[in-house]
Amino acid sequence: MIKVIASDMDGTLLGEDHRIAPETLEAVKDACDAGIRFIITTGREFKGAMQQLEGTGIVCDYIVSSGAEVRNPRKEIVALHPMNRELCRRVYGEIKEYPISAVFCTSGCNYFVGTPEEGEESLIRQIQLFHMNMCRDEVTKTDLYREMKERSDVIPSLEELEKTEVPVYKIFLFTGDLEMLDQIRRSQEKNPDIAVSSSFMTNLEITDIKAQKGPVLKEYIESLGYTMDEVMAIGDSLNDLSMLSMDFGATVAMGNADWKIKRAAKYVTRSNTEQGVAWAIQELLKRQN
């Protein structure tokens, strides 16, 4: 009997417009009405996740920043797995040798190291790379640009961020140079203290080794009294691999998922443009009724 549904957001719960389709929202609410606990598991930080959930009425738990932070339905932080200062310095010292944009993700803000002009260009490139095929001027007029700019800041050095004592959850790297990205990945994967994953083929997400969706989800649901066989986990990208490769009751890959995700999962649903989460939930509810 599935009693918990854990779902990724981008490429999974959300469509290509980065919104929840009405059919998906209805299915999630049907699951909750049936007594199933719903958990968001996302690489987004909490504020970024909430922007997409605003107005939906969904009541859930949150595993955000790829597992670095866990919040209960009251939005209270119940677990943290940040990168320590020494680890951040070591990783950044290696990646800053490459011509790549790096963002330090925290609970409240994302920080870019450089000048304000460089930070602005980095933000625009990030939106162009992941969200919108638009020219620079068009990007700056979008709601997404305004939302991301509100939760972003530019700092002159990593030392300035350290002075704030704000915990760093994740180092987010992005570039269109896939060869360079693979080189960085292979280099960083040698470090036993970190986890390296990605949401898209054009990015890397570096976290503390303890901040991975799968192990964090297991730890959290067991603290609530659930067992692994009572969980259905749904995802599409490589930062979901730690979750979908574990022996939860049902692990579901989206139809648009990376082939490694499909190979690891027990089931495959429809794509996010075909409301694959809604279809998986509806099939689950049919079988459990």
Image (cartoon, rainbow, N blue to C red):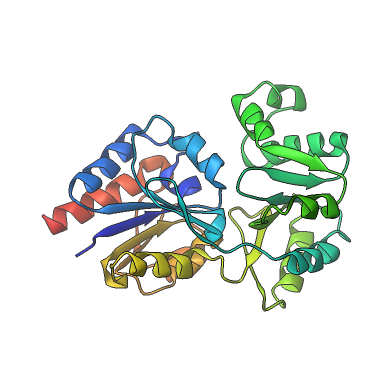
Residue 154: x and y in percent read: 80, 40
Q: State left or right for residue 228 relative to residue 75.
A: left
Of 14 and 83, nearer the camera is 83
Residue 75: x and y in percent read: 43, 46
- Image quadrant of residue 149? top right
- Image quadrant of residue 22? top left
Q: Outermost residue toward the left?
A: 289
Of 19 and 88, nearer the camera is 88
Say if residue 209 shows up in the picture: yes
- The image shows residue 31, relative to residue 53, as above or below, that is below
Residue sitting at 89 percent across and 61 percent down? 97
Q: State left or right for residue 183 relative to residue 49.
A: right
Residue sitting at 32 percent across and 64 percent down? 224
> Which quadrant would the N terminus be assigned to in this image?
bottom left
> Which quadrant would the C terminus be assigned to in this image?
bottom left
Residue sitting at 68 percent across and 56 percent down? 168
Q: State left or right for residue 48 relative to residue 123.
A: left
Residue 221: x and y in percent read: 35, 65
- The image shows residue 152, relative to residue 101, as above or below, that is above
Residue sitting at 64 percent across and 55 percent down? 201
- The image shows residue 65, relative to residue 242, as above or below, that is above
Q: How many numbered tags mark residues here?
A: 0
Residue 142: x and y in percent read: 63, 24
Say if residue 18 shows up in the picture: no
Of 94 and 251, nearer the camera is 94
